[in-house]
Structures are given as C-alpha cells and as structure tokens.
C-alpha cells in the first residue's frame, strides 16, 4: 500500500532502496514472526513512463547482503517486468474496445490474433507506423487472392515484398495531407488528394473507390 511501510515509501517516491538492516530502518513494518527474519532488502518500483505498476522486494536473512550492482540488476529486471505487465493490460484494453466496436457494427468480426485477421481478409490495410510495416508484413502468412495495402506516404511497395512473393497483390494509399490530431484529420480529410500505387488494375479501382468514398481525389 502507498502509505504503509517500505514498499509504500518506494511507491510514493518512485525510487529504489537498498537497506542493509531492516531492523534499524524506520520505514520497515514488522507484521509477524516471518517478517522478523528479514534483515537485508532491495525494493524496486515497477515503472512504465509516469505509471507505477507495483514493486519488487528482495530479502535476505543476514544484514548487508546486497550491493549496488545487484540493485542495478534487479532494476533492469523490474523494467522488463513492468513493460510486460503494461503490454498485457494494454492488450486487454484494446481487445475489450475491439469487441465493443464489433458489437456495434453489424457483420463485424473480432480476432484475437493478427494472423487470424490477416488470413480472413481479402483486403488488408497495414496501418502501423512506417518503420513497422515491413516487419509486420514479413511476419504474417499471405495467400493468392488477397490484397495487402500500406498507408505510408514515404515508402514504396518494396516493404510488402514478402506478401507479394506469397501471391498477394500489394498496393498503397495515402492522403497528401498531414494531420495534427484525429479531430483535424476528420475535418480536413474530405477534399484531400490521395496518392495510390499498385500494379493491379482491380486493386487500383478499389482504392480509387475508397478515396472517393472518403470525399477525396485519387491520383
């Protein structure tokens, strides 16, 4: 708890502590016979950005058993644990939001795994950051008859080469417009010019239709 004991001090101060003798540390709260056996301690916060997920507490029965090198090691481990916890919570949040959105859209399907979504799609848009497009495309299995499209304005179709080699048709669509935020995008997307790239006539016609449905001008 934030206001109780040594762990509470670490939570409140967002700092690691190395304690040589818990019996002389005023922050240590002795609760039962078992806690009285602890003498040395390292307590490290689990931090991700401004968020604190909890603490790691490492004890020893003898005094002064830990040093700063060991504390550095526990801090490195704590960082990875905090990221893993945060990613798990973020995945659960995104999953819940996707399921709620799916319930609101008739005929929508929600997939737990990206490969399941990719396998089911006839037209897949990779709307990840530019530096992740090639890696995501290369990590998935594609099939003939699919179209795989990225939305980067700075990358060529070469980043989709893995999908192309597996028989998928590849393309790109991107508005020639920058947007400061979502609200700005919604306001300024109509009337924007959309750059399209593909070697497939059927996919080109489909991308042109998407651009026009967004009240844009395809080129």
Image: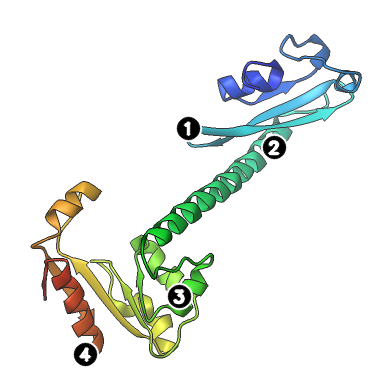
CB under 8 Å between discs 4 and 1: no
Q: CA distance from mark 1 to mark 2?
A: 19 Å
Q: Residue at x 40, y 71 (%)?
A: 134
Q: Is residue 91 left or right of residue 214?
A: right
Q: Which secondary structure, mark 1?
A: loop
The tag earlier along the polypeptide, 4 or 1, is: 1
| In the foreground, 3 or 27 | 3
Residue 205 at x, y = what percent?
Answer: 19, 84
Q: CA distance from mark 4 to mark 3?
A: 22 Å
- Label 2 neighbourhood size at 10 Å, few (<14), some (14-19), many (20+)? some
Q: Is residue 199 visible?
A: no
- Label 3 neighbourhood size at 10 Å, few (<14), some (14-19), many (20+)? many
Q: Is residue 134 above or below residue 82?
A: below
Quadrant of the rendering where the N terminus is positioned:
top right
Q: CA distance from mark 2 to mark 4?
A: 57 Å
| In the foreground, 210 or 69 | 210
Q: Is residue 71 above or below residue 82?
A: above
């Amino acid at each position: 708890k934030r206001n109780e004991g040594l762990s509470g001090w670490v939570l409140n101060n967002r700092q690691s502590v190395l304690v040589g003798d818990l019996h002389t540390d005023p922050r240590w709260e002795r609760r039962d016979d078992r806690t009285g056996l602890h003498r040395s301690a390292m307590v490290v916060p689990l931090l991700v950005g401004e968020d604190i997920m909890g603490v790691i507490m490492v004890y020893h029965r003898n005094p002064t058993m830990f040093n700063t090198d060991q504390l550095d090691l526990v801090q490195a481990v704590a960082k990875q644990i905090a990221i893993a916890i945060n990613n798990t919570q973020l995945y659960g949040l995104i999953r819940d939001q996707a399921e709620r959105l799916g319930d609101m859209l008739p005929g929508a399907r929600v997939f737990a795994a990206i490969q399941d979504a990719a396998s089911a799609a006839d037209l897949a848009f990779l709307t990840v950051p530019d530096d992740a497009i090639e890696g995501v495309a290369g990590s998935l299995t594609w099939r003939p008859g699919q179209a795989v499209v990225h939305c980067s304005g700075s990358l060529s179709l070469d980043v989709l080469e893995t999908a192309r080699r597996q028989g998928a048709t590849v393309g790109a669509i991107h508005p020639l417009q920058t947007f400061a935020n979502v609200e700005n995008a919604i306001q300024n997307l109509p009337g924007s010019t959309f750059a399209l790239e593909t070697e497939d006539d059927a996919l080109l016609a489909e991308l042109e239709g998407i651009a026009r449905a967004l009240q844009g001008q395809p080129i």
